[in-house]
Image: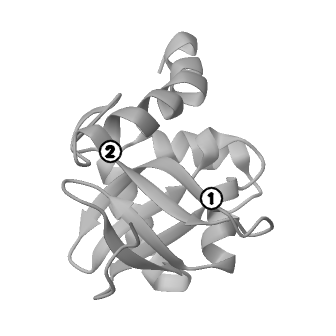
Amino acid sequence: MTPVGYQFLLHLAPRIDKAVIPRTRGRLSCAGLDKVGLVTSTGAKSGQPRSQPLALIEVPEGLLAIGSNYGRPQHPAWSANLLAHPDCTVEFKGPPQRYRAELLTGQRRAAAWDTAVDYYAGYERYRASCAPREIRVFLLRPTSAKPRA
């Protein structure tokens, strides 16, 4: 990724995606079609709804969300939100759906990490640049609860 592309993804794309994703029913983002979803969780400290565009990887059990934070040393805020309040809403490839986040560890995390790196090789660069921090990997499982309007 070029330095300009990195700055775009870091600063502009999230702002644009917060407007575009809901208008396209979770289909279109700055990254293209069906690559990024809008995850809305409850703030760990504020208790307020927080929405964050995230690259999501479809797996048989649900969706993977990778807390790479573009290789920066700290965990992304959205990952702390999911740890504190695992119930969330995801708008991805369709209308919003309810999910419950699970932080993966051990072998399950290792397998999910391999899937993530197959999806986007840049995750390995992020892993190296944020070491010794271990990137959080979440499995978002669909629930039967209806999303709040």
| Among the 4 quarters of the image, the one containing residue 136 | bottom right
User: What residue appears at the point 31 percent right and 52 percent down from the top-left corner?
Assistant: 118
Check whether the beta carbons of the residues at disc 2 and disc 1 lie within 8 A of each other: no
Q: Amino acid at mark 2?
A: Pro
Q: Amino acid at mark 1?
A: Trp
Quadrant where the C terminus sits is: bottom left
Task: Please name whichever residue, 4 or 116, is drawn nearer the observer in this view of the structure.
Answer: 4
Helix or strand or loop: what does disc 2 sit on?
helix
The residue wearing badge 2 is 22
In the image, residue 148 above or below residue 40 = below
Instruction: Identify the residue at the far front of this view.
Output: 149
Residue 78 image label: 1
Q: Position of residue 147 (x, y in %)?
A: 36, 73
Q: Is residue 109 left or right of residue 42?
A: left
Badge 1 marks a residue whose secondary structure is helix
Compared with 92, 62 (above or below) is below
Task: Using the rendered view, name the quadrant where residue 96 is placed.
Answer: bottom left
Residue 24 shown left or right of residue 143 in the figure: left
Give the residue furthest to the bottom. 144
Marks 2 and 1, Cα distance to the nearest angstrom? 18 Å
Instruction: Give the x, y percent position of residue 72.
Output: 71, 41
Residue drawn at the location 49% of the way across and 71% of the way down: 138
In this rendering, the answer to whether 148 lies above or below 37 is below
Give the side of residue 12 with respect to residue 38, left or right: right
For marks 2 and 1 on the same chain, the one whose residue lies earlier in the sequence? 2
User: In front: 13, or 127?
Assistant: 13
Disc 2 vs disc 1: which is toward the camera? Answer: 2
Q: How is the image coloured?
A: one colour
> Residue 148 placed where, x, y %?
41, 72
Q: Residues within 10 Å of mark 2 (few under 14, many from 20)?
A: some
